[in-house]
Structure formats: C-alpha cells, structure tokens
Image: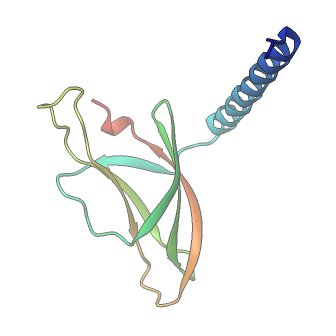
C-alpha cells in the first residue's frame, strides 16, 4: 500500500484542530472559574472531625483555589454545614504531603435528599 501525503496531511490537520479546540475549552473554563469567590477556607487540624458521606465528582485547582464538585445526602431544609481541613504536613517525604478532607455536618433533619454541590475552597492556609 502506497503512502498518501494528502491523507496524512488531512489526518494531521484533524488532530491539530481537535487539540486546539480542547485547549480553548479548558481556557474558557479556567477563566470562568477565576471570577468566582471562595465559599470555604481551609483550616489546619490534628485530627479530622466526623463527616457525612459524599462522593467526589470533579476536582480542579487554580492558584490557591480548590474547586470541589460532589454529591451527598443533604438535609431537606438545605442547611448543612461544610468545612475543609488539612493535617500538618509530613516533612519526612519530598515533596512534603498533607492529608485534606471535606467535612459535611448535617443539620440533624431526618429528611434526606440527594444534592450536588460545588465548593470553592481557599487553601492558602494549608500551603507550606
């Protein structure tokens, strides 16, 4: 089978155009995220308090802002409390590591509904 330079050129052009549109989409998402203000402030702790269960759907970082999208069993009145904690860093490894945890404190309402939430967390207090 003979190499076809026209077919190769079309294929390369298709690949390049696919990648560039994805970069533009990511840049647009990042720009829209920069406009938002944090909803939580990260806090240092030695131990994590108990939390309601949740499932993380998406995570991204932009500077000191952590964007965390998750689903959880919320109180029907919608007055659950969110907190974000980080432990002291482990300097025995390089780079130093820190455990972090989102804590959901239910309101105490016995009624539950599945909710989706995105929290913007300022993690500057947790930086080294």
Q: Is residue 22 above or below residue 9?
A: below
Question: What sort of colour scheme is used for the picture?
Answer: rainbow
Q: Is residue 125 above or below residue 45?
A: above
Residue drawn at x 24%, y 60% is 48
Q: Is residue 19 above or below residue 117?
A: above
Q: Position of residue 47 (x, y in %)?
A: 19, 57
Residue drawn at x 52%, y 76% is 74
Q: Position of residue 14 (x, y in %)?
A: 81, 23
Q: Position of residue 20 (x, y in %)?
A: 74, 23
Residue drawn at x 38%, y 35% is 124
Residue drawn at x 45%, y 33% is 64
Residue 114 placement, left or right of 12: left
Give the position of the N terminus as an image quadrant. top right
Residue 48 placement, left or right of 11: left
The residue furthest front is: 1
Q: Position of residue 102 (x, y in %)?
A: 38, 57
């Amino acid at each position: 089978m003979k190499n076809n330079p026209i077919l190769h050129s079309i294929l390369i052009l298709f690949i390049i155009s696919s990648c560039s549109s994805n970069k533009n989409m990511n840049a647009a998402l990042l720009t829209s995220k920069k406009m938002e203000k944090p909803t939580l402030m990260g806090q240092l702790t030695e131990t994590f308090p108990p939390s309601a269960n949740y499932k993380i759907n998406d995570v991204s970082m932009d500077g000191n802002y952590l964007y965390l999208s998750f689903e959880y069993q919320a109180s029907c009145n919608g007055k659950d409390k969110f907190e974000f904690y980080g432990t002291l860093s482990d300097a025995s490894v390089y780079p130093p590591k820190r455990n972090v945890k989102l804590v959901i404190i239910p309101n105490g309402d016995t009624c539950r509904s599945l909710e989706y939430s995105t929290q913007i967390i300022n993690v500057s207090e947790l930086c080294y």
